[in-house]
Image: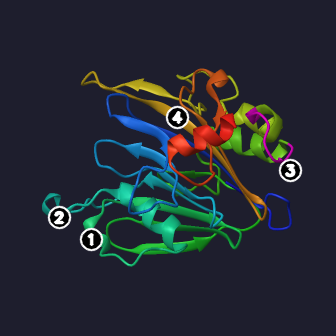
Amino acid sequence: MSVEPEAGTPVLLAGVRDEFVTRPWMSPDRHWPAYPELIGGRDLEAGGTWLAADPAGRRVAALLNGDGVAAPAARRHSRGELPLLAAAAGEFPALDLSWYDPFHLVLGGLDGVRLWSWDGRSLTEEKLPEGVHVIVNTGWDRDESQPRTAWFRPRFARAARPGWTTGGSPERFWGEWLDPASGAGVPWDDPRALIMRRRLPDGRVFASLSVTLVAVAEQGMRYDFCPQPDDPATWHEIDTSWGAPADRVRRRRG
């Protein structure tokens, strides 16, 4: 997450989704009738998302699983509804947090970036200052204690910041940001790896299933998605224009 209030693109987000490879999902679109303004990838198991964007509101919310005390199984709600609620409201939703397992929820917009962390007992809120920040499952990693943070945060910080442009390929818009967001060639089994793949003792595979790049600006929102992190050629822009998917396809062809 990069915050630079005076820049043409004041908020930039690079998000990697790590999940079990057998968990079904759909690529980003307007999947939720209750939130017609929101775009995100849909988790088909629980119905929510790991990242929700509101192009008209210039807001993006992203969720990471956290550490702490789990919610009672009998009353547990999916954390995947939290990005939808936050992106739609532009603030932290008023909820009974005892329903949710621990999480970190990031909300970015033209008014800045906020981070809420719930450990199953208490909720904290922080506003991210200007700069490049890394948020992992243990929270805001300010001391670069993790190898991937120590490796990647300086690379994002050194990369030329994308300026606002309309249209164009992911390479044209994101420029030097695209390489670190694609893993910078670090192998999956390297402790520094941003794009990972791990086989657990029970045989299940936990891996990076997608990468998202979002830029928030006064002029609009740029949303790019990579559904195959091992293949940077799969990066593509997500259509943020209004209307049903078929309507948007017709407009692009026209």
Residue labelled with disc 3: 163
With 211 as the anchor, is 49 left or right in this view?
A: left
Amino acid at pointer 4: Ser
| Residues at discs 1 and 2 in contact (Cβ within 8 Å) | yes
Task: Quote the CA–CA distance across marks 2 and 3.
Answer: 45 Å
The label number, if any, that marks residue 117 in the structure image: none
Task: Quote the CA–CA distance across marks 1 and 4.
Answer: 29 Å
Q: Residues within 10 Å of mark 4 (few under 14, many from 20)?
A: many
Task: Look at the numbered disc 1 and give the secondary structure of its residue.
Answer: helix
Which quarter of the rendered picture does the C terminus lie within?
top right
Task: Look at the numbered disc 3 and give the secondary structure of its residue.
Answer: loop
Amino acid at pointer 1: Ser
| Residues at discs 1 and 3 in contact (Cβ within 8 Å) | no
The label number, if any, that marks residue 210 in the structure image: 4
Q: Which residues are magenta?
A: 160-170
Task: Quote the CA–CA distance across marks 1 and 2.
Answer: 8 Å
State which tag comes first along the sequence, 1 or 4: 1
The label number, if any, that marks residue 98 in the structure image: 1
Q: Residue furthest left?
A: 74
Residue at 42 percent of width and 49 percent of height: 31
Task: Quote the CA–CA distance across marks 1 and 3.
Answer: 41 Å
Residue labelled with disc 2: 75
Residue 231 in the image, given as x and y percentages of width and height:
61, 20
